Image (tube, coloured by chain):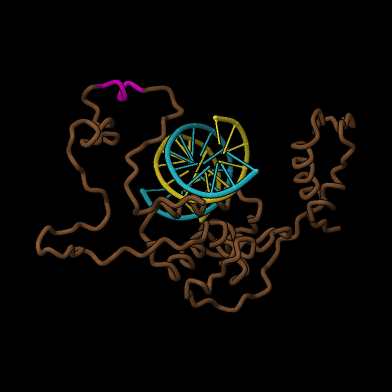
Chain colours: A brown, B cyan, C yellow
Amino acid sequence: MSTVKIGDRPKWRRRKSSKSPTQDDNDCASLAWLLNFRLDQIVNVKVPDDGPVFRKEPKVMVPDTPPAPRKPPYTYPELIERALREKGELTVSAIYQWISDRFPFYKANDERWKNSVRHNLSINPHFRKGARAPQGAGHLWSLAANAIDLLPLRNITFEDEGIALEPLQEARIIPCPKVIVLDEAAIAAASIIPDQDLFTGSKMFLNPVSAEQVVRECGLITTD
DNA sequence: TTCTGTTTAGATGGTG
DNA sequence: CACCATCTAAACAGAA
């Protein structure tokens, strides 16, 4: 498990641009370099991180700011999953709201964790994008039919954190059309079956595992 | 313009 | 050490 991040220390790192360098990037007058600049890497001085600032006097260290809320021990997929199990289906902004309401660590005006939430919604097959939201921007997100409960896998619960949770309702499951489920199975199968041609449907299996078998073995659900 | 959604890339920590 | 899961950052496109 990763243990970093928000609030631990700033990351003055910027991703290398995938674009070719522009004139501005090479221009000495550009201030873009400043974003990467850390004084403490150039000279031997201590640059305080973003954490609470401590006064030197009195002898007892007193934080100037109240202690920052501790990062909850849940991953983003776990947080999103719980929100969706509790509410059925939510827009992205409602997921933000659900998380920041329950976990002060995730401040409503912090863009960083929200980016991660969107990232997880996009890449995690646990989550399905449904119809457009009736009002507001974006779509309604819900749990995929084959989504399993993530938290029990780690033997933790939200109650461990003293978080007041509403009773779970039967999550609204977006039924996956069989073709989509089989696509996922085909992808899974492709990872264990060398030389399978997904496009031509070639049957040159080195290991005779069919997509249907993967569906069965992996517990994927088909909806006819 | 802002928000949403997708994608890519890199960092980090755990595990075998 | 390699691999994996996760987190974070960022670029970018499309919709409202």
Q: Quadrant of residue A16?
A: top left
Horizontal and vertical percent position of residue A108: 38, 62
Residue range highlighted in magenta:
A22-27
In the rendered image, residue A180, in percent from the top left (x then y), is placed at 76, 48
Identified at 78% across, 50% down, the residue is A181
In the visual, does C7 lie left or right of A26?
right
**Quarter of the image with the C terminus of chain A in it:** bottom right
Q: Is residue A115 left or right of residue A36?
A: right
Which residue does the image show at 85% across and 53% down from the upper left?
A216
**A88 up-or-down from A46: above or below:** below
**Quarter-of-image position of residue A205:** top right
Name the spot of residue A40 as percent of width and height, x first: 22, 37
Instruction: From the viewer's side, name the closer residue of B14 and A21.
Output: B14
Q: Position of residue A133 (x, y in %)?
A: 57, 62
Q: Identify the residue shown where x is 38% and y is 63%.
A: A70
Vertical placement of B16 versus A219: above or below? above
